[in-house]
Amino acid sequence: METRKLFYEDSALKSFTAKVTQVREGWVALDATAFYPEGGGQPYDLGTLGETAVLEVQEEDGVIWHKTEKPLTVGETVRGEIDWQRRFDLMQQHTAEHIISGVANRLYGCHNVGFHMGADVITLDFDKVLPEDAMSKIEQLANEAVFANIPVRCYVPAEDELPGIPYRTKKALPYPVRLVEIPGYDTCACCGVHTKTTGALGLIKLLSCVKFHQGVRIEMVAGWRAYRMFCQVFDQNRQVSQAFSAKILETGEAARRMNAALTAEKFRSTSLERQLMEAIAQSFAGQEKAICFTKELPARPLAEQLAAKGAKLAAVFRGSDGEGYSFALISKTENVADLGKALTQTFSGKGGGRDGFFQGSITATEAQIWGFW
Ligand SMILES: [Zn+2]
């Protein structure tokens, strides 16, 4: 016996009573159900049947099977409760997808060729590349449909009427074909469940549009997901606004200004660093062995400066007694590879180098390093 599909009679039905008609290996069929089985890109419902949880729902030859945690008995009457938060969220995303696909099709002639409802966002694939302003245009029109609170009409037209109705479909379907119509925006063949009116979507927000195969992939959210995302993004922006002391609608400009200032500061500090290293190298001029300790200057460029000022052996140690030192050795006359190895062995460090250059890191104090020479 085929299951009576209460979800088609009333998509807002949250609970119902029904009789168990068949059981098999953990699965249960009822004479009627409000549990939507997987299909049309929409995941199955969860919830409870009597005292047991419903783990999965699938349809087979008109019979809807519920996978339950505990067994039920043929003939018993059970009360079914849909996990409404989950179902309503899925209906919001799904119905929004219809509107976006319908509007995109009308404005740009593109076709929805892929649809995935993820845990966070839903993705929509179109078969054409869209112009740059398409996202905002589609989104604007789609939200006009939401605010107009249009009733969503789901129906099976008479077989002879069907050819006269223009509707979207991914493939040719055998009759009967169930149509979901959002008057003025979209008509699509679909077996899913939808909100009763477009106003129940609250808001549709497109998040991104990237090239995908021959067309584009759009990420979007609707309903509570859009509200939750707005709250998260608003909170992030509030934090940026506080950090930059900028008004909440001027954080972008504040971030750009900060970035420019940071770049200018980087140039300045690099230039000062170079001047400082030259001055230090100058102070070592005439010394054959230039051994230098620094807290912040980079070891290798400073060693190069020292070598350039005539040091036969330049050794720079950067760091502190507490944290240890990284070091660079440069010499044209001495074997810095042996010297470096001796240093790393003495002070349990590591390092390597070639062609008169050696760099490494060691754990030692400044006094111990002086004692090494
Ligand atoms: Zn649908």
Image (cartoon, rainbow, N blue to C red):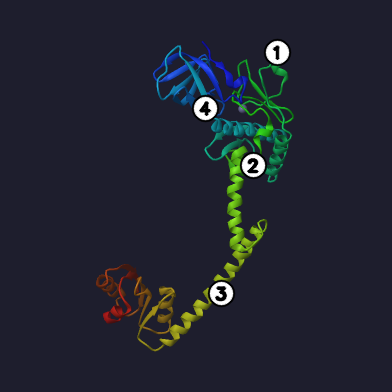
Nearest to viewer (mark 4 / mark 3): 4
Q: Secondary structure at mark 4?
A: loop
The three-letter amino acid code for the residue at tag 1 is Asp
Judging depth in this view, the residue of 298 and 235 nearest the camera is 235
For marks 2 and 3 on the same chain, the one whose residue lies earlier in the sequence: 2
Distance from the alpha carbon under mark 2 to that under mark 3:
43 Å
Distance from the alpha carbon under mark 4 to that under mark 2:
24 Å
Q: Check disc 2 and report the residue beneath it.
A: 205
For marks 3 and 1 on the same chain, the one whose residue lies earlier in the sequence: 1
In the image, residue 299 above or below residue 30: below
Q: Check disc 1 and report the residue beneath it.
A: 160
Tell me which image quadrant ligand 1 sits in: top right
Q: Check disc 4 and report the residue beneath it.
A: 45
- Is disc 3 in contact with disc 1, using a CB cutoff of under 8 Å? no
Nearest to viewer (mark 1 / mark 4): 4
Judging depth in this view, the residue of 313 and 193 nearest the camera is 193
The three-letter amino acid code for the residue at tag 3 is Arg
